[in-house]
Amino acid sequence: MGMFGFFRNAIPLLRCPRDRAGLHILHEDDASAELIFHARLGCVSCGAVFTIREGILDLLNHQPDLASIQQAEINARDAGAPLYDQQMAERGHREIPSTLAALPPLEGTRVIEYGCGTGRLTGSFLKADLVVACDFSRASLEILAAKHAKARNLAAVLADATTLYTAPEAFDCAIATQLIEHLTLPLRRRLFGHVRETLRPGGIFLSTCYYYDLRTRLRRLPREGYHRNGIFYHRFSVAEILAEMQPFFEIEHDRLIDITIPGERKLGLQALFSANLSRVAEHIPLVRQFANLILVSARKPVEPTPPNIPAPATALASDL
Ligand SMILES: C[S@@+](CC[C@H](N)C(=O)[O-])C[C@H]1O[C@@H](n2cnc3c(N)ncnc32)[C@H](O)[C@@H]1O
Ligand SMILES: [Zn+2]
């Protein structure tokens, strides 16, 4: 197996977390290779130093101190990373095909993924020219690196997504699957602001988040709280997530996905069968209220928006 390396072409797209200035390479093992295994980068303005170690760039060491909710999540994600993929395998059959189906063609594009975790979806984005994948759990990124050791266009960044600065209008597509339910409202807004800034006009932001589904509502389970491992979550209504995103993006479409039909678990269906059932259920109004996730595809407005002036009546007359 080859060694995982950091895609050099991503460096001009990244910014210093302290002052948003550019980064340059101070020292590296092999300045000719397109992948970087070990290096030190510096901010061109404040001189902060960042390291690339085993192909993973660490920006976290110069990001502002994290709130205790975030610090608790890093600890839980680091501890849980080795099991995460295994536990999510069955869910993956249900949610990943529906999520990928909502993506535009990625050939020739630049993609940024926030909260990539162990890279469950990241491999599907590598047909793009360049992929920046960020997460604040080093253990998760190390699993991503082991899985994608052959990747030649992937830049893994250890960073808090809500204070990760990247170049304006640099990406065609931004993706965040099951990240935003773990952020409080101010942090969600901060993330949306960065995503909007770093997308090119017309660029797509695809995200999934927990749905406050009918089962949870009937059982009167809380819509916000902490998982047993200490991770904060918030379950959204569709109207709520759309209202939060609308100030930043134009909503393309929303969809309820990853549906567990009542009684289904007791039947012990095979994962693939249950996944197909879930995808059929996406089209059935009441049944889809048992969805685990909301998928939202949004677009950065193309600015300036062309004025919407109706044609003058005289022009219409001359058309006759
Ligand atoms: C539920 S996992 C989803 C991982 C991956 N997107 C997937 O679908 O498998 C949430 C991930 O978001 C990361 N995360 C949560 N808050 C973050 C933040 N503020 N900055 C960076 N990563 C964050 C966690 O470490 C975790 O890997
Ligand atoms: Zn700086």
Image (cartoon, grey):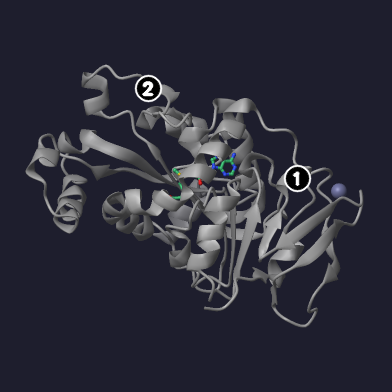
**Looking at the image, is 133 positioned above or below residue 187?**
below
Residue closer to the observer: 21 or 35: 35
Which of the 4 image quadrants contains residue 27?
A: bottom right
Report x, y in % for residue 44: 90, 57
Q: Is residue 19 left or right of residue 143?
A: right
Lower position in the chain sequence, tag 1 or tag 2: 1
Identify residue type, mark 2.
Arg
Residue closer to the observer: 81 or 175: 81
The residue that appears at 50% across and 73% down in the rendered structure is 107
**Which quarter of the figure is the C terminus placed in?**
bottom left
Asked if one can make out residue 76 in the rendered structure from this viewpoint, the answer is yes
Report x, y in % for residue 33: 72, 81
Question: According to the image, label 1 marks what residue?
Answer: 61
Determine if the C-beta at disc 1 is less than 8 A from ligand 2: no
Question: According to the image, label 2 marks what residue?
Answer: 223
Toward the bottom, the furthest residue is: 32
Q: Is residue 53 left or right of residue 112?
A: right
The residue that appears at 57% across and 28% down in the rendered structure is 69
**Looking at the image, is 10 positioned above or below residue 260?**
below
The residue that appears at 27% across and 30% down in the rendered structure is 213
Asked if one can make out residue 306 in the rendered structure from this viewpoint, the answer is no
Dot in front, 1 or 2: 1
* Crowd rating for badge 2 (residues with CA inside 10 Å; few <14, some 14–19, many 20+): some
Which of the 4 image quadrants contains residue 132?
A: bottom right
Residue closer to the observer: 44 or 35: 35
**Looking at the image, is 12 positioned above or below residue 69?**
below
**Looking at the image, is 270 positioned above or below residue 62?**
below
